[in-house]
Image (cartoon, rainbow, N blue to C red):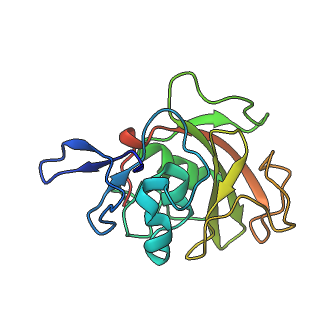
Amino acid sequence: EGHRCFRSNENGVRATVEDPETNCKDTPIVGPDSPAPEYSPKSDDGGCFITEQRHNNCYNYGNDVVTNTFAQPGRGSGEKWKSNTCEDVRAAAERDGLVWHGNEAVPTSQPEEGGHYVALLIWPNTNFHWIRMDRDLLWSHKPGQTAVRNVDNTGSKITDPSQSDFSPWTQFCGYFRTVPSNTTLN
């Protein structure tokens, strides 16, 4: 059974893709808006987070959008983040279509409006990291060019990104709602 994902044609029209032989070079490949993605690297977006691992980062994976551009917050909307602060990366992500949810309490269910949650962390003065809430309400992530995983640096399942070990990303910024078809990543 193929993974359901979406691909935009040359006119920007999104079409459903259910081909298990997904061409991971034909981007963007946009995961479904609902339900939230499952933790399944082999089938998520046709397995493209594995086959194109080096070209997609935590921002791609968190938003469930394969671009093969190592996407940067704000670049898709025309104004990339400039300083590595929660405020600047947050503003850039919001320009790309993510919706701020807050930084107080970890979400305990998927958004009623569709999409899924992501969490933003900062490695002070260096870069950012995004963590994705999967359908089972646990979290997963893809550090840089490395493999997708569903555990933190201690090997523990991720139930609360604000309390998990993602060092060197030590500054927790907060949660966003992302709807893959409403984001503009590059």
Give the residue drawn at x 29%, y 65%. Answer: 23
Question: Where's residue 98, x and y in %?
Answer: 49, 41
- Outermost top residue: 112
Q: Is residue 85 visible?
A: no
Asked whether residue 19 appears in the rendered view, the answer is yes
Q: Answer left or right for 107 relative to 144.
A: right
x and y percentages locating residue 21 in the rendered image: 33, 62
Q: Residue at x 72, y 33 (%)?
A: 107
Q: Nearer the viewer, residue 50 or 30?
A: 50
Q: Residue, x 52% and y 67% (percent of image)? A: 57
Coordinates of residue 113 in the picture (x, y in percent): 51, 23
Q: Where residue 164 sits: x, y (%)?
A: 83, 56
Q: Decide which of 54, 79 is in the foreground and name it.
A: 54
Q: In the image, is residue 102 above or below residue 52?
A: above
Q: From the viewer's perspective, is residue 175 above or below residue 9?
A: above
Question: In this view, which residue lies farthest toward the front?
Answer: 1
Q: Is residue 113 above or below residue 21?
A: above
Q: Is residue 39 left or right of residue 93?
A: right
Q: In the picture, residue 182 is in which quadrant?
A: top left
Q: Name the image quarter holding the C terminus.
A: bottom left
